[in-house]
Structure formats: structure tokens, C-alpha cells
Amino acid sequence: MALKIYNSLSRKKELFKPINAGRVLMYVCGPTVYGSTHIGHARTYIAFDIIRRYLEYRKYKVKFVMNITDIHDDIKPGTDTREITKLFLLDMQNLNIRPADVYPRVSDHITEIKKLVDLLLKKGFAYKKDGAVYFDVSKFKDYGQLSGIKLKQVKTGTRVETDKYERDEPIDFALWKTGRPGWHIECSAMIFKHLGEQIDIHAGGMDLKFPHHENEIAQSEAASGEKPFVKYWLHTGLLYINGQKMSKSLKNYIEVSDLLKRYDARVIRLFFASSHYRSQADFSEKGIKQAQAGLAKLDSFPEGHIDITSEMDDDFNTPKALAKIFKAKKWVPELESVFGLSRRHISVPKRVRELVQKREQARKNKNWAEADKLRAQIENLGFSIEDTKQKTKIKMS
């Protein structure tokens, strides 16, 4: 089966054919470094780490770029963006997310951004107003192709200077403000420098689809004259916490560093891989406990081989691939190479081994009541047992 990817631009699954055979240019929108890494970051970056790993598993040579936004409306003066970036990268490492080939910082690309803004002014796609430079969306006839917003709704001359805005309509956006770049132009400039004017995959959270990604397309294609700027757009679904949006005001804001103090990174990775990357994910204690139990089962499986390419070739369907693995009761190499789950062999405590030996003796003596009592004690210690003709198998429950 050939790999098919759901393209947010066409709103359908498409056969994956990179611009250059065997090579994939992939860009993922990175963090805005004004605070701690949170669980939403974990969901998005684990998903795209698995996708990157699978592309490499399928023998593609992937160049993977993730930007660091260190200039933005949300970043207060005096914020130590380099220290926050350092902590973000540490969180990514602790989640076993493979490092990007390049982590371009906005502050290191001001020259490239200015040149791109000047080019858009020269080509007539941008204009100056009150000391700022704006992109004129009315000049780009394909505006709205990603989000579905109609260009005819545009109100001529309506502008917005803030980096993020909620208005669900075409609106002229800032390319350059007083003394610094706008948010959207940053990604285009860094992509042009590190990957080129046309790339295979651009990925990010669903919340970035509009206006950020829509504006990236407009300014990039207007500047280069090349279409498409991105061949395949990938977006992760929204993340909820116990059915609610994550918010500090709701006291359900979970930082990755705190999460890692409570759960193994493998459990977190398995939890997110258990739902499709495009679906809405709902984080809960019940769900994470289920992932914990599932991981224990995987660790107990004997090594083996099964083919999960048909499942993963269907838009990286990790839930179906995992279901096939669990049904086969095999620990397969892809759990490590694709899912990023290193195997942990079970260490059975001495007390559990002693109880198993006593139970085996009770069964030989046909003392079934005692054997059942000992089984209950074993299960209370977090282990289960399976009786076979050859021996009693011990597993984590």
C-alpha cells in the first residue's frame, strides 16, 4: 500500500509524492518562548515526531526544521527567551522527541525577514501605514484556500496589528511593526532560508490553521511566485483536559516538567499515539492509567514481527497500528523505531517470585483455595499470572 496523507489544503487524503523523490522537506511550527512547555506542546510534537520517524522508516531522507519564536506580542520585555528555549529542548529530549535538524530563532533572521518584507512591498502585495507594513489580502486572489474563508468578504483597508486575532474574515495583517517583525512573516523567511521556497510538509496545531498558516501561504506565494508553497498541510486536533480546554484560570494547565515527574515519558507517548493525530484528544487520569497498563502489557510480550505499514500508510493511523500489535501480543521493532518506545524488561520482586512458588506448590497439592488466595496477593502487588502447560508466566497487571 502506498502512503496516503490527509492534506488540510485539499481536505482529503492524497497519495504522498514529495517534490523530490526520496527526500522530504518538513517544517513544524515551534514554540513561542514566553513560558513553560505544556501538555499541548507534548501532544503536537509527539505526533509529528512519530510521523517523522515513520517517514524515515519508509526510507525517506527527512530534513526537519522547527522554529523558535522569540519575538512576539506575548513575550514580555525582559523575558529570558534563551533560558526558556533551553528548558523547552530539555522537555523535548525527556519526551524522547528526536531533535530537529535546525532550530532557527526569529531574532537570528531579522535580515531575511526585512528582505522578504521589502520584496512584498516592491511587488505591490504590501503597503505602509502609520509606521507599519501590512500585507494587502485583496491583492492575493487565492487567500482563504486553506481555511475556506472567502476573499469577497474582505473589507478593503481593514487592518490588524496584533500577532493573533480571532476575526474569522480576511483582514490585512502586519508584516513589520515599529522596530520588529510580525508573527506570520517570520516562518516564511525561515522556511525560505533553511528549506526553500517550496516544501513538502508544513505541520502544526489546528489552532494555527487560521490566521497563521493562511497568512504564511499568502505572503510566501506572493513573494516567490511559486505554487504551492506547501504541498501537504498537516494539523493536529485540539487537546482537552477532562473535557475542558486547558486554561490556567480553570487550574487544569499541565506543564510537561510536572507531567514527567508523575509518568514515564513512554506512557505519555503511548497515550497520545493511542488517538489519531487529527482527532480531538482528551487528557484524563483514567486515560493515562490505561496507557500505563497498556505499556506494561507491551513490555510483557515476546519479541516478534508483524506488518503495520498498511495501518501507518493510511494517514499515520497509530491507533489501528497499536491495536494490531496488541492483538498479535508481540513486541515489534517498530514500537521503538516508529513510536519511540524503548523496551523495559520487567523486574519481578523477590516477594512476588516467592508467592508464585508457593502457589505452584499449592496447585500441585490441589489446594485450590490456597492457590486462589496467593493469586490475589500477587495481583495486589501489581502483577498477574498466566498458567500454561510449561510454566507459570508472570506479567505486570
Image (spheres, helix red, strand yellow):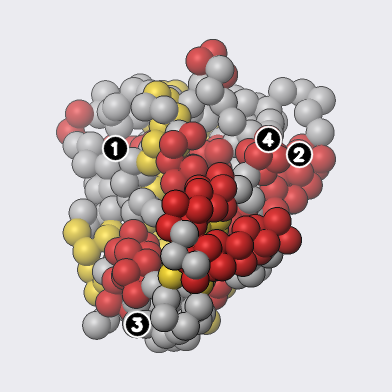
Is residue 389 among the parts visible in the rendering?
Answer: yes
Whether the residues at callouts 4 and 2 have beta carbons within 8 Å, the answer is no
Observer-nearest of 200 and 180: 200
Residue drawn where x is 23% and y is 68% of the image: 14
Residue pointed to by mark 1:
138
Identify which amino acid the numbered label 4 is placed on: Asp
Alpha-carbon span between mark 3 and mark 2: 41 Å
Residue 127, given in percent of the width and then of the height, sits at: 46, 35
Whether the residues at callouts 3 and 2 have beta carbons within 8 Å, the answer is no
Q: Earlier in the sequence, mark 1 or mark 4?
A: 1
Does dot 1 land on a helix, a strand or a loop? helix
Q: Earlier in the sequence, mark 4 or mark 2?
A: 2
Observer-nearest of 192 and 97: 97
Residue drawn where x is 28% and y is 53% of the image: 8
Alpha-carbon span between mark 3 and mark 4: 36 Å
Residue 307: give its label: 3
Residue pointed to by mark 4:
258
Residue drawn where x is 50% and y is 78% of the image: 391
Alpha-carbon span between mark 2 and mark 1: 38 Å
Residue pointed to by mark 2:
84
Q: Which of marks 2 and 1 is nearer the N terminus?
A: 2
Alpha-carbon span between mark 3 and mark 1: 50 Å
